[in-house]
Image (cartoon, grey):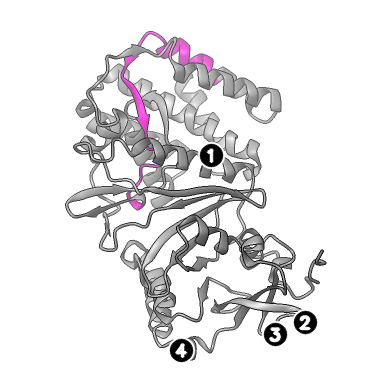
Amino acid sequence: MTAPVDATADPRSRTDGLGWVSRAVFPDRRVALTVGGDPPVGHRAVAHYAVVPSPARARFLVPLGAPRAAAASLLAYNALRPPKVRALRAAVGGLARIGAVGLAPFPTLTVSVPAGVPAAEVLLTERLTDALGGTPLLAAFGVRPPDPNHKPTLQLFSADGRPLGYAKIGWNDATRALVTAEAAALRALRTVAGAADHPVPPGLLAELTWADQVVAVIEPLPPAVRGIPVDDPPRIAALLAVARRGGPATPPRPLAGSAFLARATAQAQRAADGGVGGARAVDAVQALARRHGGTAVEFGHWHGDWVPWNLGEHAGRLVAWDWEHSGPDVPVGFDLAHDAFQRALVLRGDPATVAAGAVDAYLDRHGDRLGLGPAQRRLVADSYLVEMWLRTWRLADAGAGWNAALHPALLDVIEKRHSG
C-alpha cells in the first residue's frame, strides 16, 4: 500500500480557490500536486497544467501538452461570458495556441501518481475517459473562491480541441443534491426536448459516484450557441412548454391539497425542527394556505433557475442549461417569477423586498399570457417567495450556509405581504 504524499507544498493545503478546487478534483492523497517543481521520488507525471495567472491569484488551470485543447478550454463558448472575462480568456487562449512556449510565463502544476498505481484508480479524469467511451481527454477548470454552494466543473476536450462535455462535481451534501437533481432532470427531458417551443437542454452523457462525490457529465453546448441579452423579454411559449413538458395545459386545481403545499408544509416543519427561521417558515406556509388555499391554478414543472445567463440561442431554437433546481408540481408561473426576482437581485443588486416587488410587476405585465388572473398572480408570487426561502434553507441545511441576501430578509418580506 502506497503512503499518502507529504502535502507541505501541495496546493490542496491552501485555503483559497486553488486549494478548494484542487481538493475537489484530486481528492486522493496518493496523487501528488507540485507547482513549479518535479514529482516526488517514486511518482510519474501524468498531467501538467498552467496556473493562470499565478497560484495566489489563480483563475484557470489550462491543460498542457495539446495546444488545440488548451486554446479551446479558454476560447470555447467565450461569447456567453461577461466582457471582462471574455477578454482575459481570449488573450490567454491566443498564447495557448502556440503551445507550452506561449504559456511559459505561468507556473506549471504537475500531477503525478505513484509508480505501479493505475491512474484510473486515483484520477477523476481517467474515470471520465472510461465513462465517455475511452477517447483520451484533457480537462480544464476555472478557479473560483471557496463556496459550499458551488460545484467545481471540468471542461473536457479531446486533444484536437473538440468539446466532449462538462463534468460537474457534487462534493458536499448541498452540491451532491444539486448534481443528482440535474442528472435526473436531463434524463427526464430526453423525451420532450424536441417538443414545439420547448428549449433544447443538453444531454446527460454519464453519471457516476467517485471518492464520495457525485459527478454528472453534461453534453457540451452547440459551438455556435449565443447568449441572449440580459434585458431579453420573457419567452412565454418556452416557459409554458417547460411547465407542461411539451404537452397540453392541465386543468387548474386549488392550492389546498396540492403536492406543492404538502411539500412546503413538510419542509417548513423540518426547518422548524432544526432551529433558525423554521417557526417563521411554518407560519408563512400556513398563512399562504389560508390566503390562497381556495384559489385554483395550473400546476406543472419548472426549470428552477430560469434567467438570461442560463439561456442561449442556436439554429433558431432556445437552449437552456443548468437544470439543477428543476422540479414538478409547482404553480405555473414560477419560472417567470424567478426571472424577475433574479434580474432584480443579481443584475441590479436590489434587496429582497424590491426584488419581490419586481415579481409582482412582472406577473402583472405578463401573467395573463400564462392564463393567470389577479388572484392566480398573487398566489404564484406568494408561493414562489416561500419556495425561495425553503430553497435557501435546504441549501443551508445541507451545509452550504445561509444566503445573506435572502435570509432572514425573505421571511420579513413574506410576513409583510401576508399581513398587508
**Mark number for residue 406?**
1
Three-letter code, disc 2: Val
Q: Which residue is mark 4?
A: 102
Q: Residues within 10 Å of mark 4 (few under 14, many from 20)?
A: some
The extreme left residue here reads 316
Q: Residues within 10 Å of mark 1 (few under 14, many from 20)?
A: many
What separation in Å lies between label 1 and label 4 (alpha carbons)?
Answer: 45 Å
Three-letter code, disc 3: Asp
**Mark number for residue 278?**
none
Figure quadrant of residue 7: bottom right
- The N terminus: image quadrant: bottom right
77 vs 44: above or below: above
Is 23 covered by the magenta stretch?
A: no
349 vs 285: above or below: below
**Which portion, as a residue range, is magenta?**
284-309
The label nearer to you, 4 versus 3, is: 3
Return the x and y of residue 365 as percentages of the image width and height. 23, 32
Q: Which residue is mark 3?
A: 38
State the SS at label 4. Answer: helix
Return the x and y of residue 334 as percentages of the image width and height. 36, 31
Q: Is residue 132 left or right of residue 361?
A: right
Q: Is residue 116 left or right of residue 376?
A: right
What separation in Å lies between label 3 and label 2 (alpha carbons)?
Answer: 9 Å
- Of 370 and 39, nearer the camera is 39
* Label 1 or label 2, whichever comes before in sequence order: 2
Q: Which residue is mark 2?
A: 41
